[in-house]
Amino acid sequence: MNRTLLLAAVLAIAPLGARAQGTDPNLGRMLASNCANCHGTNGASVGGMPSLAGKPRAALLQMLREYRDGKRPATIMHQLAKGYTDAQLEAVSTYLSAQKPN
């Protein structure tokens, strides 16, 4: 195979790979499932911990970033939030804000 043909094949396939790795429509839901352990299913707490469901997206995102960056005091949240990228925190915030509060 000559180089021109190989390059054309790679360039033709590259966009497919990028699309295959695009944003998963369920990403926020999957990531927020980790929150359910303490904050209840879909962020709707039944007591003990604050509910996250239906809270403003911007407020949730700001809190998560503050936990991650060590700017907000916490017992465990700062450790959990460190494992998330900005895009993942945005997905979680978007998902939880769209859920119905108790």
Image: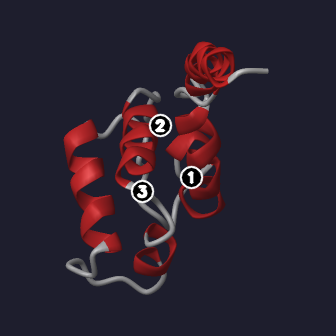
Mark 1 lies on residue: 46
Mark 3 lies on residue: 85
Q: Position of residue 25 (x, y in %)?
A: 57, 23
Q: Are marks 2 and 1 in contact (CB under 8 Å)?
A: yes
Cα gap from disc 2 to disc 1, whole angstroms: 8 Å
Q: Are marks 3 and 2 in contact (CB under 8 Å)?
A: no
Which amino acid is tagged 3? Thr
Cα gap from disc 3 to disc 2, whole angstroms: 28 Å
Could you tell me which secondary element the residue under label 2 belongs to? loop
Q: Position of residue 69 (x, y in %)?
A: 27, 75
Q: Is residue 24 above or below residue 52?
A: above
Q: Position of residue 21 (x, y in %)?
A: 60, 31
* Tally of marks: 3
Could you tell me which secondary element the residue under label 3 belongs to? loop
Q: Quadrant of residue 66?
A: bottom left
Cα gap from disc 1 to disc 3, whole angstroms: 28 Å
> Which of the two discs, 1 and 3, sits closer to the camera?
3
